[in-house]
Amino acid sequence: MKSNSSLSKLIPVMLCFFAMGFVDLVGIASNYVKADLGLTDSQANIFPSLVFFWFLIFSVPTGMLMSRIGQKKTVLLSLVVTFASLLLPVFGDSYTLMLLSFSLLGIGNALMQTSLNPLLSNIVRGDRLASSLTFGQFVKAIASFLAPYIAMWGATQAIPSFGLGWRVLFPIYMVIAVIAVLLLGQTQIAEEKEEGKPSTFGECLALLGKPFVLLSFIGIMCHVGIDVGTNTTAPKILMERLGMGLDDAAFATSLYFIFRTAGCFTGSFILRRMNAKSFFAISSFMMLLAMIGLFAFHSKTSIYICIALIGYGNSNIFSIVFSQALLYMPGKKNEVSGLMIMGLFGGTVFPLAMGLASDAIGQSGAVAVMTVGVLYLLYYTLKIKK
């Protein structure tokens, strides 16, 4: 009876993880907006960069908000903001409108990522938390995968688009957001009470003074840096070393996502049987081997194998680091969650460093920056509790 009760709570939460993946539509959408409005690369690139900017601004305040109104209400608020962001493009795709839409999408996602993970920890506890977070990331990846295809089908009229073309993606995901609100709204989830009174902004940031919390925060930054870095650098390596065109080289990004999604799915089962420390070590070593390969290899097959290894190796890093941080300070779950999600700002820091390094010595410079991140994760392995 208890497992059925847990399952009935897990389904709405997993649907929210699917809604969390809506943020990844910004990649394909920005390309379509660029084509529709004749934008430059720098103008179009503002859209994806907005997402990481809002993580920096909203993550810690969201942790404080959760302490006051609860995790479930914060997730519901994030879904309402996401709904608003998906509604706007139905009325057009002017630059200002899309800027506002993607800003709301980023804010909604920052709220959701901060609150949804600790909400799940009220349903799944202890050792099973990492595997459940990984499964949530797998569900999120499905939404990320589907977005480009739905937009493409709408643009080619392969599905009824009601005159919206590629923008039919927004109302489709908007309907799912509404369903998620309704299902989660009627689901009873008992939330653990935090110790003492809610923390102030300064007290939240002061938690970075705890060595393990700081190590975990940097671990999240490295994970996201490697993630975003591989997406942008993998095609460039193929173009630089093999003279491939962008259209052909772009498959490298798809390959990364394929193996990252497969890693999330299989990782959710592996983590039920293997302790987190061992699996984290194996994942980090896989990425280290791949980085060494990207320095040394110049054949297409070898480079593809390295990209696949990074995709699989990086797929479970976030879930393990996040769960370790929550389990380290269970009485400050909301504040720790806010700090960990703020670490997603690494998706802005790493690409900047990689750009400078690749300008100086080619794509091997970008790989060197990612390798520093992998070496840090290997060091973090030593700090994980079994």
Image (cartoon, rainbow, N blue to C red):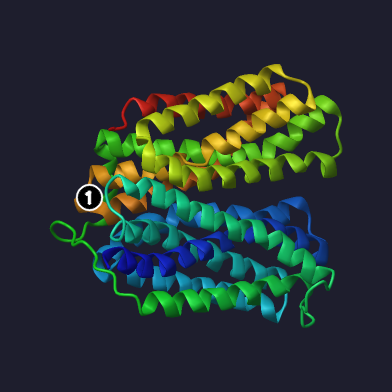
Q: Position of residue 116 (x, y in %)?
A: 39, 61
Q: Position of residue 155 (x, y in %)?
A: 81, 69
Vertical relation: 31 (above or below) 36 = above
301 with respect to 291 (left or right): right
Q: Quadrant of the N terminus?
A: bottom left
Q: Residue flagged by tag 1: what amino acid is it?
A: Pro
Q: Quadrant of the C terminus?
A: top left
* Quadrant of the image occupied by residue 190: bottom left
Residue at the spot 35% in from the left edge and 53% down from the top edge = 338
Residue 126 visible (yes or no): yes
202 with respect to 282 (left or right): left
Residue at the spot 61% in from the left edge and 37% down from the top edge = 229
**Residue that label 1 marks:** 330
75 with respect to 191 (left or right): right
Vertical relation: 179 (above or below) 376 = below
* Front-lying residue, 261 or 339: 261
- Dot 1 crowding, Cα within 10 Å, few <14, some 14–19, many 20+: some
Vertical relation: 247 (above or below) 184 = above
Disc count in the image?
Answer: 1
* Front-lying residue, 25 or 9: 9
Residue 107 visible (yes or no): no
* Quadrant of the image occupied by residue 156: bottom right
Kind of element beneath mark 1? helix
Residue at the spot 26% in from the left edge and 65% down from the top edge = 2
Q: Position of residue 48 (x, y in %)?
A: 62, 55
Q: Position of residue 375 (x, y in %)?
A: 47, 23
Residue farthest to the left, as pictured = 196
Residue at the spot 28% in from the left edge and 52% down from the top edge = 125
Residue farthest to the top, as pictured = 296
* Front-lying residue, 179 or 214: 179
